[in-house]
Image: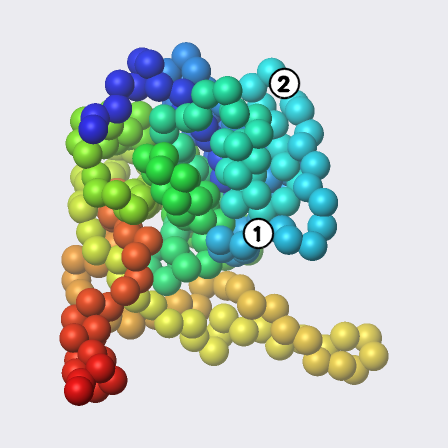
Amino acid sequence: MAIDLNKTRILVSNDDGIEAEGIHILEHIAKTLSEDVWTVAPLHEQSGVSHSLTLHDPLRIRKFDDRRFAVAGTPTDAVLLGVMEILEDKRPGLLLSGINRGANVAEDVTYSGTVAVTMEGTLLEIPSIAFSNRLLGDYEDPVVDWSAPKAFAADIVRKLATIDWPHGTLINVNFPGLPADQVKGIKVAPQGRRKIDKEKLHKRTDPRGRDYYWIGGPGMTPFDARPDADFHMLLEGYITITPIQLDLTNFALMDHLRQTFEAA
């Protein structure tokens, strides 16, 4: 069923934290779509925590103003408390996540707290869209250009609101990090695959001579040959839109497994 944005309560969240620049931009975009916009986000940055829940520590909510709240927990915690506690009187009809500082394509979606926000929203039967913006330049001092999300995000939401995407499916949107006037267009792209290079693991030695490691950096290499995958399209300067389903079942393999294990 299409979404009437003028009458829809929108929940905004992220994984970069309540004070991140990207969420302020997304809040502004959301307010051009609806007058009923609420924000419930992690209190601190939670990048890379994926779809994790806080199970062994208490969760606290901090109120910033009448419609802005932070949760001292993961992105998933923020969505759960936002929907079930803060907005208990009226559930949101749309969930927007981001705008993440850095792309979330290929295998990133399995690590990303930004995408996890929309996973939880989808599990709660709320149409959910994740937004991420690629970083350019040097890894230690990247260039962050928000002009493309500012120019295109609202219209992308409006168009997505006119369609009825399948049950159990979220929408993952990535911007190429280019100035808005250099974006080549929009590509609906399948999720690609990349692998972590050795350069992604940074070995260091502490003052006591013991080894430790940092996982991070730009060492990612394409792993598949699909030229139309999200990762490749983003590098070519396109905005990518990828529908992602939560059901991970490999139905093609199920038939073979049934013949192997269930045969009389």
Q: Quadrant of residue 228?
A: bottom left
**Camera-nearest residue between 156 and 96:** 96
Mark closer to the chain start, 1 or 2: 1
Q: What residue type is labelled 1?
A: Leu
Q: What residue type is labelled 2?
A: Asp
Please give the residue where the numbered disc 1 appears in the rendered image. Answer: 53
Q: Can residue 243 be seen in this view?
A: yes
**Camera-nearest residue between 221 and 195:** 195
Instruction: Give the x, y percent position of residue 226.
Output: 17, 65
Please give the residue where the numbered disc 2 appears in the rendered image. Answer: 65
In this rendering, position of residue 135 left or right of residue 63: left
CA gap, disc 1 and disc 2: 25 Å
Count of numbered circles on the image: 2
Q: Can residue 131 be seen in this view?
A: no
Instruction: Give the x, y percent position of residue 136.
Output: 41, 49
Residue at screen point 53% across, 64% down = 216
**Mark 2 residue crowding within 10 angstroms, few (<14) / some (14–19) / many (20+):** few
Instruction: Give the x, y percent position of residue 47.
Output: 54, 51
Residue at screen point 24% across, 68% down = 250
Which numbered tag is attached to residue 236?
none
Instruction: Give the x, y percent position of residue 67.
Output: 56, 19
